[in-house]
Image (tube, coloured by chain):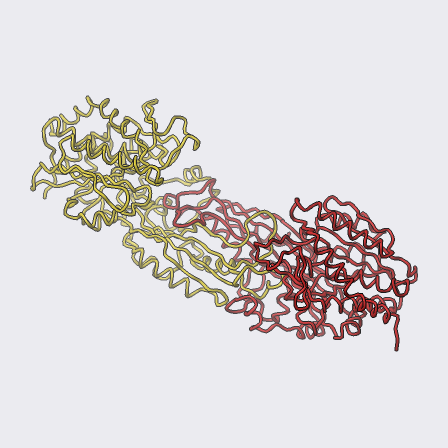
Chain colours: A yellow, B red
Amino acid sequence: MTSQSDLPRQYSRSHAEKFRHELFEMLRIPSISADPNYAGEIRRMAEWLASHLGGLGLDNAQVMETAGHPVAYAEWLGAGMDKPTVLVYGHYDVMPAAMEDGWVTPPFEPVEKDGKIYARGATDDKGQFLIHIKALESYLKTQGAAPVNVKILLEGEEEISSPNLTPFIKANLNMLKADVCVISDSSMRIIEEPAITHSLRGMCYLEVEVEGPRQDLHSGFWGGATHNPGLALVEIIGKLYNPDHTIAVPGFYDDVVTLTADERAMLEKVALTEEMFKDATGVPALWGDENYSIRERVSARPTLDINGIWGGWSGPGPKTIIPAKASAKLSSRLVGDQDPDKIFELLKKYIESIAPPAVKVKVRLVAKGNPALIPFDLPEMQAASRAYERGWGYVPVFTRGGGSIPVVADIHNLLQIPVVMMGYGLDTDGLHSPNEHYSLEMFQRGIETAIVYLEELARLPR
Amino acid sequence: MTSQSDLPRQYSRSHAEKFRHELFEMLRIPSISADPNYAGEIRRMAEWLASHLGGLGLDNAQVMETAGHPVAYAEWLGAGMDKPTVLVYGHYDVMPAAMEDGWVTPPFEPVEKDGKIYARGATDDKGQFLIHIKALESYLKTQGAAPVNVKILLEGEEEISSPNLTPFIKANLNMLKADVCVISDSSMRIIEEPAITHSLRGMCYLEVEVEGPRQDLHSGFWGGATHNPGLALVEIIGKLYNPDHTIAVPGFYDDVVTLTADERAMLEKVALTEEMFKDATGVPALWGDENYSIRERVSARPTLDINGIWGGWSGPGPKTIIPAKASAKLSSRLVGDQDPDKIFELLKKYIESIAPPAVKVKVRLVAKGNPALIPFDLPEMQAASRAYERGWGYVPVFTRGGGSIPVVADIHNLLQIPVVMMGYGLDTDGLHSPNEHYSLEMFQRGIETAIVYLEELARLPR
């Protein structure tokens, strides 16, 4: 049986060296978003992409301004109005990297070794989003057309929390209108187990500040009659949890979508054993709500963590003060349908209600992001599953990511479309770390899977 | 009625200008013990003192070496074996001081203004210990003899916690042998209420470190199944207290000497009102064990304070980590007969017993000091009271200091003698702060009180 994707897949194999060469070109541009000194490189990267996309025959290929680093955009709408439109999201910016961090080879001079490309951005995210560009190219060069319409949105600020992307999407809703969004910026455990991430946790990050005396006090002169702000903070934080390690804030769990038996069974497939968890983290024992499996706890359930706590003297030796202030940064990872604003109000109200009378307590929102939960039985999700089976060679697992990528919820909510996260990296690729790398085999399999995915999407009933 | 002290008191009045001039000379030497750059000034100060004491006719006047800054020592033993010997302790070192801290006049160029001397060390402790030297001089210059033997021990490391004084005392027990020790290094609330400090709190200072994962973890990938070391620390510290603000560590109060009705009545005389406490500290409300008055809580009862707490991210913005470690510095102010080593063992054992299983906890002793409790009905104490009445003009109060001066307990224990703390400063003198000052009237009254005290001691039955 032949299919529309056979020739494009052959093209992708026969042009593997050209593709790799193009990836190397991209990796040589140090498009570091966090460092203002690299703003010129960021722009050069965006211009390279717009030019490359235009050269492949895409329309409207351009560098578009935002209040920060620009967006590179292009579209191919030749499949016609009766075919679905796919929005491909990726980010061309990278984390900082320098030899002194422990790189074996210069981070912006890509090197191939044992089938892997070593360079900053290889897996996060240049190597991954290029897959979709090369999949589209493979159709256009062999058949002059792809089975679906494709819009490509590449931002330059993902590594600095995408401060200007939501306004950009809001300002360009018509241009970005699509039926499904596909993002390749995640990973799988092993090559034989491709993973579709259908859920990410949201975020409610707050700071609690406890004020006591107007300045640090001599603990000898005032100790015993002054409520120590450090202790008041300890008391407040302690009351946020129940003895069974669940969160004691009234209403906190109200909007948590209950896991179905199917979902629990699916999570069971990617179960984390206690030994694996201990090996990976170094903790002496596990912790958490024992009504849920480890995998459920780290992905499908909301959390409340202390990200930082400070007050008083932390230098060497004794300093006998009652600190004037003590503070903590706390964050909740949220799951569907929890709303970060509502959770912040619940936390703030509860903390204020338990604040001891001999101190003053301030609660401040630091950051927030919506959780994203895409039903995995959506046709676009199932199409992705079939694409992996045909293009990758293995049936994928649907996984819940424990982390937060606020742009996923934003695209889902603003454009009202499902987001399919088809990660083509490996957990061990070392993203954000020295010697980040990317497997050429994953790159090739990714392109073939992306080719098949466009075909599978075209086949969906409309 | 005439007394042996009349002529010396007259001498002290008629030589007030000379005494002030000598104090100014001392204050011009920046004998800062904390800064190694001032080691030469420290030595110059010790040499000035030895020379001055020798010039007054004292014997054995010398600079004596320690492992750190030297001690200045001298003695006058002319009263004979049948008379008591007083050991005067003081410290000639001072806290650092610089104009940029907020001094109005240079800290080592003493200035007299409105009856006060402005200079670093004016009240802490040069102006105070000089009182005893000038009292002895007043006897020697008018009568050729004092009513008791006097030994003068002046150290140069008090402001850096006297690291070498205990070894010095142990090595010179015979030289320092005395019947009573008098220390002037404390203060009174108002000039009409001279204060004899008969109790100081001891100290048990410890550090608690909670270790969880081997490095900071991504709170999204691991949150929900990892016991957050910050939370574990919060749980541990929370369990150290009872809801009524008492300390929950078993055995903690076992050795606390109960306050007698007399003692409570005496503390009532120097009662601190809630308003005074709030004005002085800026706290919105008071806290502590309501079975005791405010004054009792800050001086006669033991405490447990958080001096510092830290772990994870305290910089700006969100950082979504589970910190690998969290730590706290805790200290107990102890009262008689609590033993700092025993208290440390109780705290360590209890903390280890409540340590959650998913973290590792280390408890380390940082510093310790014995409490000092000198019965105020001792003849040497009552003699001091009479000295104030006659020399100062007011009946003094006996107070309990909330702070800790380990040398007091060391002198008391090693030399087996009562320590009488006759402070000649005012609470408002700004010691350790910019624009430290000292009242000339207090200096004069102090010398006359010290003159009378020697006479009162000589009259005690032996």
* Residue B312 in sight from this viewpoint: yes
Where residue A442 sits in the image (x, y, percent)? 27, 29
Quadrant position of the C terminus of chain B in the picture: bottom right
Task: Choose top left, top right, bottom left or bottom right for residue A17.
Answer: top left
Q: Going by the picture, which residue comes out furthest to the bottom?
A: B1
Residue closer to the observer: B189 or B217: B189
Task: Choose top left, top right, bottom left or bottom right for residue B405.
Answer: bottom right
B273 to B429, vertically: above or below: below
Looking at the image, residue A272 sits to the left or right of residue B289; the answer is left
Looking at the image, residue B308 sits to the left or right of residue B451; the answer is left
Where residue A216 sits in the image (x, y, percent)? 55, 59
Looking at the image, residue A421 sits to the left or right of residue A291; the answer is left
The structure residue drawn at horizontal position 45% and vertical position 46%, both measured from the top left corner, is B323
Looking at the image, residue A381 sits to the left or right of residue B230; the answer is left
B39 to A328, vertically: above or below: above
Where residue B301 sits in the image (x, y, percent)? 64, 65
Quadrant position of the N terminus of chain B in the picture: bottom right
B109 to A399, vertically: above or below: below
The structure residue drawn at horizontal position 83% and vertical position 62%, both measured from the top left corner, is B136
